[in-house]
Image (cartoon, grey):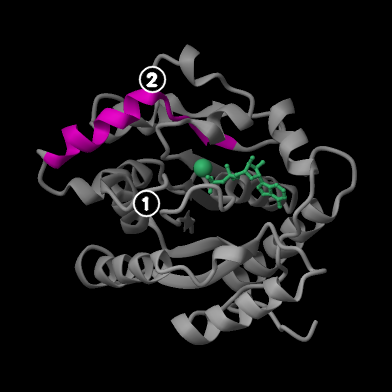
Amino acid sequence: MTTVLAVANQKGGVAKTTTVASLGAALAALGRKVLVVDLDPQGCLTFSLGHNPDRLESSVHEVLTGEVAMREVILPTAEGLSLVPATIDLAGAEAVLLMRPGREFALKRALASLGGDFDTVLIDCPPSLGVLTLNGLTAADAVLVPMQCETLAHRGVGQLLRTVREVKEITNPGLELLGALPTLYDARTTHSRDVLSDVADRYDMPVLAPAIPRTVRFAEATASGATVLAGRKSKGAQAYRELAANLAAHWDTGAALTTFNAAD
Ligand code: ADP
Ligand code: MG
């Protein structure tokens, strides 16, 4: 059985793309067959996994518009992930899909065409709540919301959770909200911790552990076309490995996910 996880937050710079790449590499290291899907016209995930979006003939855009089968656009990456790449063409998908019936289901249908080829699919949603993110949420079994600790209390979270509730009512009743993933976390400041306990109360949503620490290794990794897991030992890589192990246990045995404890 394939588990599909959407990584979504309409705010940019909260580590959606980093989470998809690093968590994907960590799940692959656990022996799972992992497909990552770039749903952002900026193509940052595609680029960070070593492929130049400007040089690609076809991408997830042609898959969503029905011109090319998903299997035909899948690329290999150095860390054993399979990638459905994005190019800037995807910026036009919104307009093309708007004219189509069942536009929220384009990605779900494309993933169904893969049969059981993958254990886990991770979807990197763009920084908006438009038709692409609706496709990601509609295709997913679960959604994870990366949040930068400084901005956890922002109003945008309420809007995102409202969208998740609407998707559950209209296009995907089975969607599970896994919770918020604290990113760019600085354990030295009490502010980060306060914000985390506040979000759990305010939005009645689990805050997952471990928090992903802020480290310079992520920028170094992106520049080299590899994930942080491929480089030297780092606290960031270790946090994503722990998160991957927690998710794998949750999916395999139904174990509860570890949540954040402000006292830690
Ligand atoms: P999004 O996809 O939500 O826009 P990105 O994953 O592209 O966010 O991350 C935004 C920036 O933050 C990138 O430059 C990335 O390298 C950096 N970044 C992500 N996670 C961390 C981290 N834990 N520590 C330091 N920098 C990070
Ligand atoms: Mg991104």
Amino acid type of the residue that numbered disc 1 sits on in the rendered structure: Gly
Q: 91 above or below 98?
A: above
Q: Main secondary structure of the magenta part?
A: helix
Residue assigned mark 2: 58
Q: Residue at x 69, y 64 (%)?
A: 243
Q: Does the rendering let one see residue 259?
A: no
Q: Image quadrant of residue 246?
A: bottom right
**Residue under numbered circle 1:** 136
Magenta region, residue range: 82-98
Residue at screen point 23% across, 63% down:
171
Give the mark nearest the N terminus, 2 or 1.
2
Across and down, in percent, residue 165 comes to 30, 73
Query: What residue is rendered at 31% in x and 31% in y?
Result: 91
The kind of residue tagged 2 is Ser
In this rendering, the answer to whether 224 lies above or below 7 is above
Left or right? Give the position of 226 relative to 43: right
Cα–Cα gap, marks 2 and 1? 19 Å
- Which quadrant of the figure has residue 6? bottom left
Q: Where is residue 73? Give x, y as percent.
A: 43, 26
